[in-house]
Image (cartoon, rainbow, N blue to C red):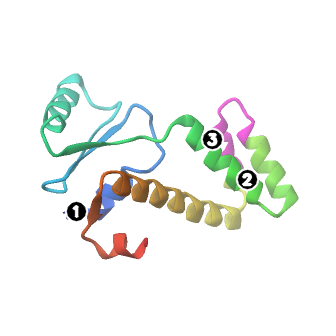
Amino acid sequence: MPTTVTVRWDDFEAAFIIGSPESRYFLDTTTGAVEYTSHFDDEAVRERVLRRAAAPGWLEIPRPSEDDARAEVSEFIASETDEAIRAALQAGFSERHAFKGFNSALGKYPEARRRWTSARLAGIHRRLLAFTRRNDLVVDDDRFRALG
């Protein structure tokens, strides 16, 4: 039987964004609270969050790997139908700082940026749904139900 949990949707959804690999997110399946640590936190804050998240009922929300992030960007670039835009995005992504280069190139093409925003949100929702299925969770929120 699935566990139903009520969450603050924006906090829960944000936990699935591809971001800093040093960040760690945790969900309390009893209260729906989402806690996280980041590279900005000092050791005392990290320890406090990790102690709390070690209690029964807490789940760590897995972070996408850099390989996952690269695959998501590569898939998006490959889907671009305008050859000049696709070449510019690929050139940006081939720079030493791939994600910065990609975002810099993307900024020059507003329509491609809108498509990337939609693709990125779809990736967030794929990871969110995979996590809830893997952990037999149902989120009591209309936005979750709309994901299918």
* Amino acid type shown at disc 2: Ile
* Amino acid type shown at disc 3: Arg
- The residue that label 3 is drawn on is 70
Q: Is residue 103 visible?
A: no
Q: Nearer the viewer, mark 1 or mark 3?
A: 1
- The residue that label 1 is drawn on is 1
- The dot on residue 77 is 2
Q: Is residue 143 magenta?
A: no
**Residue 21 percent location from the top left of the image:** 44, 34
Residue at (80, 54) in percent of width and height: 86
**Residue 92 percent location from the top left of the image:** 74, 42
The magenta region covers 93-105
Q: Is residue 28 left or right of residue 15?
A: left
Q: Is residue 13 left or right of residue 34?
A: right
Q: Is residue 98 magenta?
A: yes
**Residue 6 percent location from the top left of the image:** 20, 64
Q: Is residue 24 left or right of residue 27?
A: right
Disc 2 secondary structure class: helix
Residue at (42, 40) in percent of width and height: 63
**Residue 65 percent location from the top left of the image:** 51, 37
Q: Is residue 37 above or below residue 116?
A: above
Q: Is residue 109 visible?
A: yes
Residue at (77, 60) in percent of width and height: 80
In terms of sequence position, does the residue under pointer 1 or pointer 3 come before the other?
1
Predominant SS of the magenta segment? helix
The residue closer to the viewer here, 70 or 37, is: 70
* Amino acid type shown at disc 1: Met
Indicate the quadrant where residue 107 lies: bottom right
Q: CA distance from mark 2 to mark 3?
A: 10 Å
In terms of sequence position, does the residue under pointer 2 or pointer 3 come before the other?
3
Q: Residue furthest right?
A: 83
